[in-house]
Image (tube, rainbow, N blue to C red):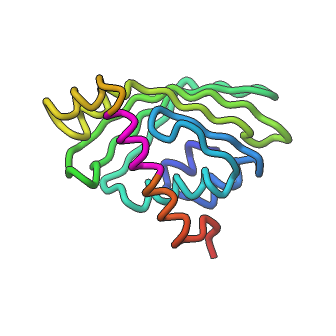
Amino acid sequence: MFYDAFARGDVDGLRGCYHPDVSFGDPVFTELQGRERVVGMWRMLLGRASEFEVSARDIDAGDHSGSAHWTVRYTFPPTGRRVRNEVDAQFRFEDGLIVRHRDVFDFRRWSTMAFGVPSGMVIGSMGVLRRRVRDRARGQLEEYLRGNSPISG
């Protein structure tokens, strides 16, 4: 259900999968707390991406935990470069909803696709530059959330 909504770009569908107290983390958005912030992040990313495609496989979900492998293809807005990111996801469920969502991907590989060679390779391998990418993404999310309610009308 989550990846079906994701593939459709259905942010309200994603929202319905998340627990109010969800926490999310990945190599760029290292830790987000609460459904409105997590859904706001997806709304921002989906709204900015072009030529966006998501596919998922190896989906395994039990009563309390789950996992999946998903692939996303999109054009990275700041550079116009095509990105194909392979992501491993881990989930924890509470009350039938996702309460913990952790995505893992190769940051260096992603940054090389997003920023090109050699810039992306340098960004992906240097901690201080990784932090700059994270800080910028966090700042963009904060600005987006101030100006846009993550709850649809």
Predominant secondary structure, magenta span = helix
Q: Is residue 57 above or below residue 1?
A: above
Residue 107: horizontal and vertical position, in percent? 37, 28
Residue 85: horizontal and vertical position, in percent? 36, 33
Quarter holding the C terminus is bottom right
The region drawn magenta spans 129-138
Q: Residue furthest left?
A: 118
Residue 113: horizontal and vertical position, in percent? 24, 35
Q: Residue furthest bottom?
A: 153
Q: Residue visible at 36% across and 41% down?
A: 133
Q: Residue furthest right?
A: 95
Report whether 46 appears left or right of 77. right
Report whether 85 appears left or right of 82. right
Q: Is residue 11 above or below residue 153?
A: above
Q: Is residue 77 above or below residue 112?
A: below
Q: Residue visible at 27% across and 49% down?
A: 75
Q: Residue visible at 46% across and 29% down?
A: 87
Identify which residue, 132 or 33, lies in the foreground.
Answer: 132
Identify which residue, 75 or 146, lies in the foreground.
Answer: 146
Q: Residue visible at 74% across and 26% down?
A: 65
